[in-house]
Image (tube, grey):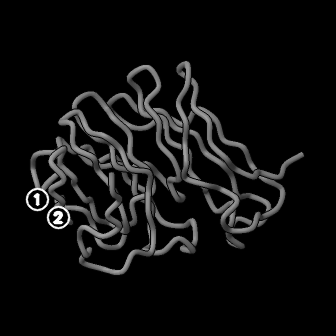
């Protein structure tokens, strides 16, 4: 019957966020910067429940992977960070608070969104697309992972750079298809 708009003061200034997700453990997980917030069904809020995430990366997207969460992170600490550096995906069991079960090197560029398609993690990266470093060679890279090394499934090379912010981290999965928003000029 009422809405409470403040329950917890987070430990740091929020510069980036990713879509929240309900975990297999029935808790709500919300993400900002390199922090994970857990909200229990009883409304108990805990900030920074996974202290093992690196501080030089930011969470961009999270997806279920079996009974785990796959947490995608891109290099940089702000939403306006250049799409350079290597991205990583952290496989987390939602129980351990200091370490993750696995770390996957997602490759060069900023990992923008993740999805789970038929048990495989699909990730889309901005590889210098919105950076002057990629002038004429920037691309959108789609990779799939189901163990081992992520495999490049498609790379669309642009013929010019795009404005930062035209590659969003929101994703929708429907009928085993993944939908996301990106602007890739080519042709």
Residue occupied by mark 1: 98
Picture residue at 18% right of the left edge, 36% below the top: 25
Residue depicted at 40% across the width and 57% down the height: 73
Q: Residue furthest front?
A: 1
Report x, y in % for residue 148. 33, 33
**130 vs 172, nearest the viewer:** 172
Answer left or right for 173 relative to 3. right
Q: Nearer the viewer, residue 162 or 27?
A: 27
Asked whether disc 2 touches disc 1, contact meaning CB atoms under 8 Å apart, the reply is: yes
Residue at the far right in the pictured view: 187
Tell me residue 16's x, y (percent). 45, 68
Q: CA distance from mark 2 to mark 1?
A: 5 Å
> Callout 2 environment at 10 Å: few (<14), some (14 to 19), or many (20+)?
some
Label 1 residue SS: loop
Q: Quadrant of residue 48?
A: bottom left
Residue 82 vs 37, above or below: the answer is: below
State the image coordinates of residue 30 (x, y, percent, origin top left): 33, 55
- Name the image quarter holding the C terminus: top right
**Tag on residue 51?**
2
The one of 139 and 97 positioned closer to us in this rendering? 97
Q: Which mark is residue 56?
A: none
Task: Write the residue at 32% across / 30% down.
Answer: 147
Is residue 62 left or right of 134 when viewed as pictured? left
């Amino acid at each position: 019957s009422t809405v409470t708009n403040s329950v917890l003061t987070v430990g740091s200034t929020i510069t980036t966020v990713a879509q929240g997700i309900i975990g297999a453990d029935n808790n709500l997980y919300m993400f900002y910067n390199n922090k994970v917030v857990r909200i229990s069904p009883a409304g108990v809020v805990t900030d920074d429940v996974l202290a093992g995430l690196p501080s030089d990366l930011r969470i961009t997207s999270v997806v279920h992977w079996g009974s785990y969460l796959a947490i995608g992170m891109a290099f940089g600490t702000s939403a306006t960070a250049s799409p350079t550096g290597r991205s990583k995906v952290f496989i987390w069991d939602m129980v351990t608070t200091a370490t993750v079960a696995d770390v996957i090197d997602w490759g060069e560029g900023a990992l923008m969104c993740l999805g789970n398609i038929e048990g495989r993690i699909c990730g889309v990266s901005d590889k210098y697309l919105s950076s002057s470093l990629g002038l004429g060679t920037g691309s959108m890279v789609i990779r799939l992972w189901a163990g081992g090394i992520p495999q490049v499934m498609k790379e669309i090379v642009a013929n010019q750079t795009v404005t930062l912010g035209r590659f969003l981290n929101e994703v929708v999965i429907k009928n085993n298809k993944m939908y996301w928003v990106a602007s890739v000029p080519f042709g």
